Amino acid sequence: MMKKHTLILFLLTSCLASYAGNPKDQQQLMAKGAQVTKAGGGFAFTEGPAAARDGRVYFTDQPNDKIWIWSEKGNITTFTQISERSNGTYFNAKGELVTCADLHNRLVAFSSDGQRRILTEGFDGKHLNGPNDLWIAPKGGIYFSDPYYIRDYWEEGHLEVQSTRGVYFLSPEGKVTRVINDYKQPNGLIGTPDGKSLYVSDIQDHKIWKYEIAADGSLRNKTFFAPEGSDGMTIDRAGNVYLTNQCVSVFNSKGENIAKIAIPEQPSNLCFGGKKRNVLFITARTSVYTLKMKIRGY
């Protein structure tokens, strides 16, 4: 096992080794003098950050089956201790926290008091592989990835029954359709606030693809966007897309890598939080980190 300082050096080196961008681009993103700061630790594996209307960030600790809340004041409190092993999360227009809950392979919506309702739990008469990440479009439709990662908490005999590791669209009316079926392992995804484009990671193939979103929720015009896979993703108000792999990697809307931000632990996901949406909140294995930004997110 690597010692902590050796691991940090390894991640930093891996992060910057293939980067030949302009340092000024990175300076345009972050607040002056800002540094990555550890906001909390002692978790098993953090994932799925999502910002509520008030700027607080909800994030999951999947192995421990919990969802936590981070506030800009620096406090971290418990939201629920029964999360159905939630992974990716996103808030809907009702203020419910919608999560990819792969204990029972379904999407669940949590109300502010922790009450749950099931949104969907199957496709084509079979259970899902294990929903991983999601994004909710402006009109309420939900895109979610459904890869297959074997969980030790699944009941004995749980099988991968879907014919492909796909991406699905859950319409506001409750209909589920498969919109991507040609990936090795879909994972992180994020859409543009205008609801016109969707970015999706094929993490095993180390590629990000961009799609146009049609009026019926289907996807068209698949276009190569970036030569990296990503666990989680977010987007800022300039249209820059943030990826998580060995570090936080930032691509502008043209698909140009404009920044790489080293994190002390390998990041898994991220979002913009705080009342002004100017805090980049990063989940990374056993800890969570923040970075004050010049640019804002949503």
Image: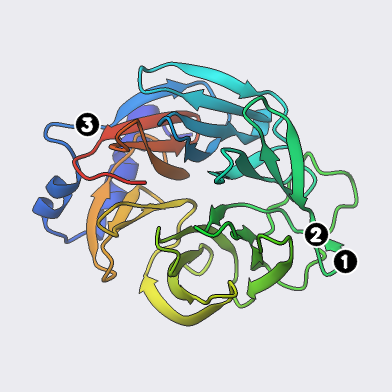
Q: Is residue 124 left or right of residue 83?
A: right
Label 1, on which residue?
125
Q: In this orientation, which residue lies closer to the viewer: 270 or 217?
A: 217
Which residue is outermost to the bottom? 221
Q: Secondary structure at mark 3?
A: loop
From the image, tell me which residue sits under label 2. Answer: 122
- Amino acid type of disc 1? Gly
Quick one: SS at disc 1?
Answer: loop
Residue 231, how many percent across, how many down? 49, 52
Q: CA distance from mark 3 to mark 1?
A: 49 Å
Q: Are marks 2 and 1 in contact (CB under 8 Å)?
A: yes
Q: Which mark is residue 35?
A: 3
Q: Nearer the viewer, residue 19 or 76?
A: 76
Which residue type does callout 2 highlight?
Gly
| Residue at image location 84% in from the left, 58% down from the top | 159
Q: Amino acid at mark 3?
A: Gln
Q: Earlier in the sequence, mark 3 or mark 2?
A: 3
Residue contact at pointers 3 and 2, CB within 8 angstroms: no
